[in-house]
Image (cartoon, rainbow, N blue to C red):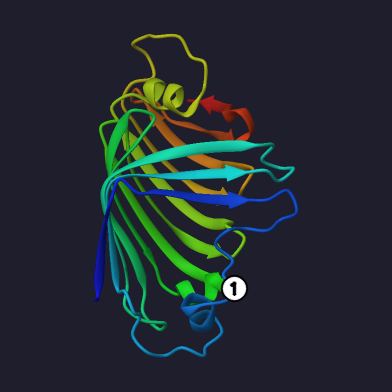
């Protein structure tokens, strides 16, 4: 068996208050691969999730009980062997918005072992188009860069949790920035933003605890 298809599966990822994480494998094929003791092809090279759910819960002090869920319409995960990249591609839904995703992790064995790996991600949806690249470590922290665009900055910020009223300003936008992502927040600290044909510089932070959003910009 080289591939599996799981229908209506529910997968839980958890981070405990003591720092333990459910994806820190200590035994089995993934642990052996991460330690460099398993150089054979993976027993199962691809897993396809259809009509499933991935739930994430973080009880650490920084996240303060943050939970979220992603509906997986149809996504295929692939990892052929220890020295190969891992990928995920397909259709998901978050907060009632659908998107196509594509993620590539260059060295998944290193991440499982607590090290780092290059990562690239792309999201295409009706709310925004986003591409990001950088380094991901075993604690789930990513540092890199991001670019994004969409038809309405106002709607995107409301989707992320900022309490903006409905309106017609803050429409089409383009964004570029360095990116820092950890279990507490997503931070864009040197944002180059073009909303409504204007130029702006500033910062944007989305805190996962209560999904608080803070931003500050100077507009030319």
Q: Quadrant of the N terminus?
A: bottom left
The image shows residue 19, relative to residue 155, as above or below, that is: below
Point out residue 94 in the picture as x, y percentages from the top left corner: 37, 35
182 horizontally vs 75: left or right: right
Q: Residue 214, can we see it?
A: no
The image shows residue 89, relative to residue 54, as above or below, that is: below
Residue found at x 55% / y 27%: 218
Point out residue 204 in the picture as x, y percentages from the top left corner: 55, 34
Q: Quadrant of residue 77?
A: bottom left
- From the image, tell me which residue sits under label 1: 115
49 horizontally vs 65: left or right: left
Residue found at x 41% / y 72%: 106
Viewer-proximal residue, 130 or 203?
130
Residue found at x 61% / y 71%: 114
Q: Residue 103, can we see it?
A: yes
48 horizontally vs 23: left or right: left
The image shows residue 89, relative to residue 81, as above or below, that is: above
Provide the secondary structure element on which disc 1 rests: loop
Residue found at x 49% / y 49%: 12
């Amino acid at each position: 068996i080289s591939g599996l298809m799981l229908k209506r599966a529910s997968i839980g990822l958890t981070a405990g208050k003591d720092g333990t994480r459910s994806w820190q494998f200590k035994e089995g094929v993934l642990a052996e691969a991460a330690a460099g003791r398993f150089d054979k092809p993976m027993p199962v090279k691809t897993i396809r999730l259809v009509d499933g759910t991935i739930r994430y819960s973080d009880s650490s002090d920084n996240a303060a009980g943050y939970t979220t869920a992603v509906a997986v319409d149809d996504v295929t995960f692939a990892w052929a062997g220890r020295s190969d990249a891992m990928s995920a591609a397909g259709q998901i839904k978050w907060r009632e918005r659908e998107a196509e995703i594509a993620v590539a992790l260059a060295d998944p064995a290193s991440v499982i072992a607590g090290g780092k790996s290059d990562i690239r991600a792309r999201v295409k949806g009706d709310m925004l188009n986003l591409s990001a690249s950088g380094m991901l470590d075993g604690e789930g922290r990513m540092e890199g860069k991001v670019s994004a665009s969409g038809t309405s900055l106002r709607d995107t910020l409301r989707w992320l949790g900022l309490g903006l009223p409905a309106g017609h300003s803050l429409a089409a936008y383009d964004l570029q920035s360095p990116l820092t992502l950890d279990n507490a927040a997503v931070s864009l600290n040197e944002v180059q933003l073009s909303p409504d044909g204007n130029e702006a510089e500033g910062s944007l932070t989305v805190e996962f605890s209560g999904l608080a959003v803070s931003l500050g910009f100077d507009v030319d």
